[in-house]
Image (tube, rainbow, N blue to C red):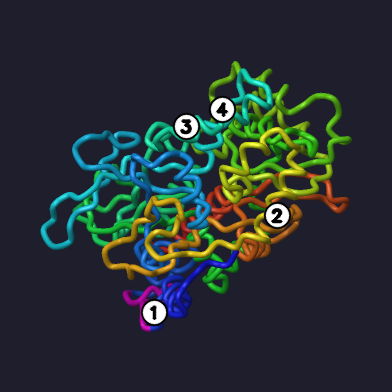
Amino acid sequence: MAQLRAPADDQRQQEALHGDKGGVDVAGGGGGNESNKKASAGLCGVLRERKVVDLARAKRRLVEVPYTATLAHTANALLAARVSAVAVAAPPGHWIGAGGSMILESDPATGAVRKHYIGMVNMLDILAHIAEAGDEADADDEAVDLGRRMAVPVSSVIGHSLEGLTLWTLHPNTSVLDCMETFSKGVHRALVPLESSADNVVAVELVESAPGYRMVTQMDVVRFLRAHGAELRGVLSRTVRELGAVSEAVFAVASGARVIDAVKAMRAASLTAVPVVDAAAVGEETLQDVCVRSSSDEHIGAGGDDISCLFLLLLVSQGVGKKAVETFSATDLRDCPVARLQPWLGISVTEFKRKVAEYRASNKPVVHGADATGTGVPVAADADAPAAAAVATDEEQSDEHPLVTCSLESTLCEAIEAAVTRHVHRLWAVDGDGLLRGVMSLTDVLRAVREAALGEDRELHSIVPS
């Protein structure tokens, strides 16, 4: 689904990604003696020069829901705004933010606090809540119970996913390199104030008060890397195998598995997407059995993309070496309205994918200004945003393609191009026969680029006097 954006927004986003033409020449160091020029050149120079606020300014508006919104309203807001996470806002002084954060929005004229962002709810939080409905029920009961479970306030499910345990914000002067450090640890998105009241400049803040925020995501940083491909060609020309960007742990789901069972397994693994493999290739052992046998291991990685060693060992054999036919993701569930989701929890993931594709084709979303959800729950805009502006933030896009893959010998440039143009957050690595060999997420991409940048920087400083 293409982002809804005014014509001038494309130019603004490109300027944010590429920088003003009259800016500092990063490769040349912008001044000083020759040694300093050489030391500031290269990958680290590009990533240190640009600030995260440059990426934030290109974003349209922050999508949020009030703490009183029901989970059903929130799911419909995600669908209407074409995003996979929304900020949850509450009156100030009555809540403790996720992870103890105090992220406040203040009046630009008076400085008075208007609201407190108490957390972020994404599709994995909703998946976790849905999965709980089926823990001790059969398929028919699950469909009946889902309506009641989706009527709870959104504030009650904050933190169901690992990422939701903390609400992140980045100081606007944080460099892209430091932003990558945060995102390479599994944080997928963070709020960035366009103006900050904080004096200190550090990558991650838990206390902030500002008149407006934008959401910056892993995909925004990956787009930045793509836009600066000529300057970063040294690392982007290397293969994903060479960079160690592909994880061999692949959690797959059988094509015949029920949606509710796939959701439970994804919840246990803290994953938002899995490859779907042919049911005949999986055998009699189901993925749900794998999750049950590993349930005693509670040391799941805090980043959301990393799972404990025991869990990984149990999952590798399920995906690696098998033929993937499509992807089942949180986006598929987001694109399915709650009323349709209830009777579809008991069908196979393959049938579910078909039904969602048919629904997408026949129900193109229409944005109606500030109330883009169509549910009576407004998608709030920053004060400086036009009232009728499109709410799509380009943070997440529908993956209408069944499978996006790469090979272990693909260059990082090729992998980034595929991720950006196909709007996906992971690529399945396959061999010449199309069999799964691993997975590469945007977390892996950013980690690989950052490690390469720091390694190059150490080499430069080892040969250039300070």
- Give the labeled residue for mark 1: 20
Marks 2 & 4, CB-CB < 8 Å contact: no
Q: CA distance from mark 3 to mark 2?
A: 28 Å
Q: Residues within 10 Å of mark 4 (few under 14, many from 20)?
A: some
- Give the labeled residue for mark 2: 357
- Give the labeled residue for mark 3: 160
Camera-nearest label, 2 or 4: 4
The answer to which of marks 2 and 1 sits earlier in the sequence is 1
Amino acid type of disc 1?
Asp
Task: Give the residue at x 65% y 26%.
Answer: 311
Q: Residues within 10 Å of mark 1 (few under 14, many from 20)?
A: few
Q: CA distance from mark 3 to mark 1?
A: 41 Å
The N terminus: image quadrant: bottom right
Q: Position of residue 322 (x, y in %)?
A: 83, 40
Q: CA distance from mark 2 to mark 1?
A: 41 Å
Q: Position of residue 390 (x, y in %)?
A: 44, 67
Q: Position of residue 109 (x, y in %)?
A: 13, 62
Q: Secondary structure at mark 1?
A: loop
Q: CA distance from mark 1 to mark 4?
A: 54 Å
Report the span colored magenta.
22-32
Task: Report the disc number at residue 267.
Answer: none
Question: Residue 200: in sight, yes or no?
Answer: yes
